[in-house]
């Protein structure tokens, strides 16, 4: 799946940005178009391995876009996933009639989206260069960095564990990669890191839409615990798991105090790399 080209077609800027950020966390090369007409032009300039298109758009709909692709021998093998705010028998039947590979409900979650994207890409067949203007094959992206990090970054997480309120600490890197962790173990920590990175990405899109300042700190309450997310720098985020949902003031003060050391540790790590 990594390195495959995906075209997102949606008239909503927010949806395009969210999909671009979500799919990029899986190593996909994502381009976007605002209309189906622009999408068709993009497809014939640089054929994608997958198209994800909204059903309801000004001008040509997602159903019509799918039908156009399936009726053209040059693009008939490109799988299309449609996005619809309403999922019922009629929508599913129309999607099948148009030749869509699958339908995703809106709003969607990574759990809804990623399995369908993965299945669609496995079913995707290369388009002959003679049919659509050939483009250079994308180079595979480098594999995610392992969670093991230089000792200094790990050491800088330990002061958080001295506080009785803090159960665990981790650092999330670009693309949702888990870069360091300490304290009580997480169940599937890499998956948690990806979800939290996605949440921050969505918050960033909303901030851009409403011209708000970038999110620096976020607290999430879940099952009697608190997840405290704090930006270390634009690329890395600190996540603390706290016992209970109140009394986070002391921990927030410690986060501010410890931030310079975390930034310096990440700078050292970049220098070593």
Image (cartoon, rainbow, N blue to C red):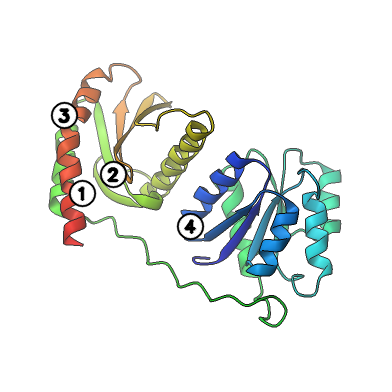
Q: Are marks 4 and 2 in contact (CB under 8 Å)?
A: no
The one nearer the camera, 4 or 165, is 4
How packed is label 3: few (under 14 Cα within 10 Å), some, or many (20 or more)?
few
In the rendered view, would you say 107 is above or below 211?
below
Q: Earlier in the sequence, mark 4 or mark 2?
A: 4
Estimate the spatial distance between the alpha carbons at disc 4 and disc 3, rounded to whole Å: 34 Å
Left or right placement of residue 164 versus residue 71 in this view:
left
Q: Is residue 12 visible?
A: yes
**Location of residue 150 (image quadrant):** bottom left
Q: Quickly name the residue at label 4.
A: 26
Callout 4 crowding tier (Cα within 10 Å): few <14, some 14–19, many ≥20: some
Dot 3 or dot 2: first in sequence order is 2
Chain-order first, disc 4 or disc 1 = 4
Q: Mark 1 or 3 closer to N-term? A: 3
- The residue indicated by pointer 3 is 257
Q: Looking at the image, how many numbered discs can be counted on the residues?
A: 4
The residue sitting at 81% across, 70% down in the picture is: 72
- Number of residues whose C-alpha sits closer than 10 Å to that of mark 1, classed few (under 14), some (14–19) or many (20 or more): some
Q: Quote the CA–CA distance across marks 2 and 1.
A: 10 Å
Q: Badges 4 and 3: C-beta atoms under 8 Å apart?
A: no
Disc 2 + disc 1, Cβ < 8 Å = yes
Residue corresponding to mark 2:
171
Q: Secondary structure at mark 4?
A: loop
Q: Secondary structure at mark 2?
A: strand
Along the line of sight, which residue is nearer the eye, 79 or 14? 14
Left or right of 108, for residue 29: left
**What whole-number distance in Å separates the C-alpha atoms at marks 3 and 2?**
16 Å
Residue at the disc numbered 1: 266
Gap in angstroms between the C-alphas marked 4 and 2: 18 Å
Please provide percent x and percent y for residue 183: 23, 40
| SS at mark 1 in the image | helix
């Amino acid at each position: 799946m990594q390195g495959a080209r995906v075209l997102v077609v949606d008239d909503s800027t927010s949806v395009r940005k969210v999909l671009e950020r979500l799919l990029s966390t899986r190593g996909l090369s994502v381009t976007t178009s605002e209309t189906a007409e622009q999408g068709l032009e993009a497809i014939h300039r640089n054929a994608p391995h997958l198209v994800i298109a909204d059903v309801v758009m000004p001008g040509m709909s997602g159903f019509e876009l799918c039908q156009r692709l399936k009726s053209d021998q040059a693009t008939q093998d490109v799988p299309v996933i449609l996005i619809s705010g309403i999922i019922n028998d009629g929508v599913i039947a129309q999607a099948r009639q148009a030749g869509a590979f699958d339908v995703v409900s809106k709003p969607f979650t990574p759990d809804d989206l990623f399995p369908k994207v993965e299945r669609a890409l496995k079913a995707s067949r290369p388009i002959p260069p003679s049919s659509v203007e050939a483009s250079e094959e994308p180079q595979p992206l480098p594999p995610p960095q392992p969670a093991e990090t230089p000792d200094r970054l790990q050491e800088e997480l330990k002061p958080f564990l001295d506080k009785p309120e803090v159960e665990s600490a981790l650092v999330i890197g670009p693309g949702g990669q888990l870069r360091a962790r300490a304290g009580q173990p997480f169940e599937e920590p890499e998956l948690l890191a990806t979800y939290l990175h996605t949440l921050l990405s969505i918050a960033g899109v909303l901030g851009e839409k409403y011209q708000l300042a970038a999110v620096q700190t976020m607290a999430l309450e879940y099952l009697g615990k608190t997840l405290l997310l704090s930006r270390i720098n634009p690329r890395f985020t600190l996540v603390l798991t706290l016992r209970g949902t109140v009394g986070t003031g002391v921990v927030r003060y410690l986060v501010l105090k410890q931030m310079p050391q975390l930034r310096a540790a990440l700078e050292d790590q970049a220098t070593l790399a």
